[in-house]
Image: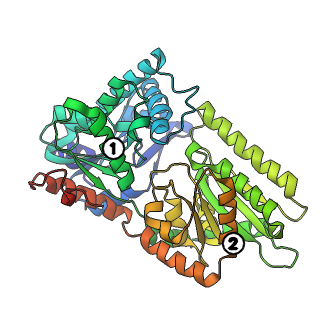
Amino acid sequence: MASTHETAARGAEVLVASNRGPVSYEVREGGALHARRGGGGLVSGLSAIGPDVGALWVCAALSDGDREAVRRGVGEDGVRMLPIPADVHADAYNGIANSVLWFIHHLLYQTPLEPVFDAEFRRQWASYEAYNRAFAEALAEEAAAGAAVLVQDYHLCLVPGMLHELRPDLRIGHFSHTPWAPPDYFALLPQDIRERLLTGMLGADRLGFLTRRWADAFTACRTQFAGAGDVRKTQVGVHGLGADADFLRERSHRPDVDERMADLRAQIGAGEDGEARRTIVRVDRTELSKNIVRGLLAYRQLLDDHEEWRERVVHVAFAYPSRQDLAVYRDYMAEVRRLAEEINSAYGTPGWTPVLLNLEDDFARSLAAYRLADVALVNPIRDGMNLVAKEVPVVSDEGCALVLSREAGAYWELGEDAIVVNPYDVMETARALHEGLTMKPAERAERTERLTAAATALPPAQWFLEQLTALREMRESPESPESPESQPS
């Protein structure tokens, strides 16, 4: 990518906007700044378009290190960090994006008690608007005439509308990595907030979603709530983000993963007959929607219903911290820990720990667990996609049965070869775990092969480029946004 200064001078042709960028900074002893590069689909996508395009990534300075880097004028090529005040970001990110929009789209509210849209909510909403405005103004400043801008996720729902007002010449896309709420749940929001969110989204030329289900939910909200403000012919497209098979296979066979596999095998141990124990693996953030608690309850039910599995199976549960600055998430992590300890206390023996719970993020260890898994448990109550469901089959050494919630976005691509469950039904999930553990090796291998093919159909770089191409081409096409050709799936 071109340097930030060169890009700004001539204007970027392709811009990405997201809350978190591809690099972060920390201030080390003595005041030195250390940069840490990230990965993911957007990084792969920007790399795939080549160095001569003139691409720029606009993101927020999230940490004290990030803000210090901005203050010193330190930066990575092709990245512009916005020094949004920490209190404004906290209100926008935790107060609105993660405590309101995330809860709305994942249907997480306990409605007898929440939500409460009071004066504090309105104060935080003002910060959300200011946060989005900072992005819109930066993108307007940096973009070349007619440039393509790809805005990411629920943190930045207002940016397309704001940016269109500032720069109507730009081709603006927005992609939602989460589900979208159906109209009856979206209606929990105050009327003016609903309209503001939809007007913001409909400022885009094109909106992308992970599944047709989420796209249809948005369209239903648009029809019911957007009203007279919906004057643009915004297209809606579907792009199911796939796993990066080449990266996963290479990364999962590095020495650090082999070391963690050896450690895990030692912790899992062998049964009284000397055979290696079977493994049920889950890898998640301790996010409320991931349904970790019911997964543990289903495992306990399995041990109650099928005593033959006692001493012969281990539930490897990696539940990595998420949003621990929010009390409800701290409480959820505490409940996960409490239940795991309760199962180990009730069923464990001196030579067998039924649940191996780890709460510290370690990607190499996650890949080791993927390779060892006999059964993968992916049971969210609602998920935009869930890449874990796609990654495990790719990495698995011997083939892995996938127990998959019907409420995961990945269900629409993987459901035919997974064991599908209602995520609220603990008894059904326990039966599915038993089915996965008893599946014949040949069937498991065949299913894994088909799951892998489906999981890797649209790898990250292609996923990004497909959206970019659709956005660039749409102004040259007379197609109506209602036509099937303008809504790829």
The number of discs equals 2
Q: Distance between the residues labelled 1 and 2?
A: 38 Å
**Residue 149 as seen in the image, left or right of residue 330:** left
Q: Residue at (32%, 32%) from the top-left corner?
A: 197
Q: In which quarter of the image is the N terminus?
A: bottom left
Find residue 473 and report its horizontal and vertical position in percent. 15, 57
**Residue 169 as seen in the image, left or right of residue 440:** left
Q: Residue at (74%, 45%) from the top-left corner?
A: 337
Can you say whether 55 is above or below 431 in the image? above
Amino acid carrying label 1: it is Phe
Find residue 232 and report its horizontal and vertical position in percent. 16, 39
What residue did someone put label 2 on?
Answer: 437
Find residue 36 and report its horizontal and vertical position in percent. 47, 50
Q: Which mark is drawn over residue 218?
A: 1
Label 2 residue SS: helix
Earlier sequence position, callout 1 versus callout 2: 1
Q: Taking the image as drawn, is residue 69 in sight?
A: no
Mark 1 is surrounded, within 10 Å at the Cα level, by few (under 14), some (14 to 19) or many (20 or more) other residues, namely many
Amino acid carrying label 2: it is Leu
Q: Residue at (46%, 15%) from the top-left corner?
A: 119
Label 1 residue SS: helix
Q: Residue at (71%, 53%) from the top-left corner?
A: 296
Give the residue at the far top of this rendering: 119
Find residue 99 and report its horizontal and vertical position in percent. 50, 32
**Residue 373 as seen in the image, left or right of residue 228:** right
Q: In which quarter of the image is the C terminus?
A: bottom left
The one of 360 and 379 positioned closer to us in this rendering: 379
